[in-house]
Image: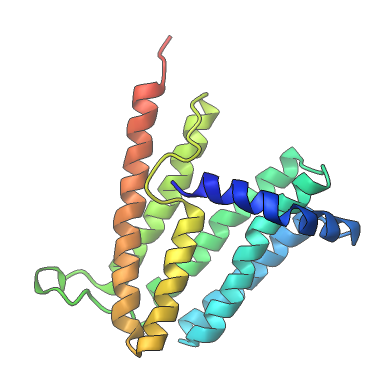
Amino acid sequence: MLSKTLKTTAGKVLDPLGKFLGSLGIKPNHITIMGLTLTFYASWLLYDQKIYYAFSIGLVACLLDGADGLVARATKTTSIRGGYLDATLDRYADCIAFSALVLCNWVKPLPIDSLDFISGQMWAMAAMVGAFQTSYCRAAAERLGVSQEGIGLIERPERWFVLGMGLLIGELVGNVETIITIVVAILAILGNLTALQRMLHFWNEAKDE
């Protein structure tokens, strides 16, 4: 919901930076690939419970995630191939990050007796499914002629922001296991609700011939 506003504001503020990076000969695709590389590194640090390092590297990766499009627009080098590469590697980044949470053994069940049968790994898997379905619902809808920009409770920028803040707060208060499990559960719920919102939106907007 906030993504469109954030992108518009960031575009106005950071446009000079995009032009500067472009003048150095840095290509948007280079930034996209570097972002994925840093996401992999941040995910490894997350798996290894090195939270501050994971947060710092992940923050840089998130900045690069937006910088590729920024440079492309600022230097007027947008392309179909670049857009495809960005969208594809974004899905790999989502998968890598949530896989680190699925595979690690320090994400615990929620501290709620009625929900303690759901493991932290199950919440992480549900969050990953929600992330993928959110993206796929938009791609499928727009391929069929229905725009879904800004539709839904939580999109990719908000998802990364919430996850990063959860890690940082959990480390600061000394209770990463509980805080990150709560955050991942929230992402699981909101992500799948977003996918359902987009499905409903498409159903109402699509016109059958």
Q: Is residue 103 left or right of residue 30?
A: left
Q: Please tell me which residue is depicted at 23% across the width and 75% down the height of the picture.
A: 109
The relative height of residue 20 versus residue 150 in the rendered view (above or below) is below
Please name the residue shown 74% across and 43% down the image.
Answer: 81
Q: Quadrant of residue 123?
A: bottom left
- Nearest the eye: 195 or 183: 183
Q: Is residue 5 above or below residue 146?
A: below
Farthest-out residue, bottom: 174
**As drawn, which residue projects farthest toward the left?**
114
Quarter of the image for residue 84 reads: top right
On the question of residue 99 being in view, the answer is no
Residue at 27 percent across and 79 percent down: it is: 108
Q: Residue at x 49, y 80 (%)?
A: 46
**Is residue 79 at least partly visible in the picture?**
yes
* Residue 139 x/y as whole percent: 52, 37
Left or right placement of residue 23 versus residue 43 in this view: right
Considering the image in quadrants, where does the C terminus appear? top left
Query: What colouring does the structure picture have?
Result: rainbow
Q: Position of residue 68 (x, y in %)?
A: 72, 55
Residue 131 in percent (x, y) is at 43, 54
Quadrant of the image occupied by residue 159: bottom left
Q: Which sits in the foreground, 9 or 27?
A: 9
Q: How many marks?
A: 0
Apparent side of residue 128 relative to residue 8 in the rendered image (left or right): left
Q: Position of residue 180 (x, y in %)?
A: 35, 75
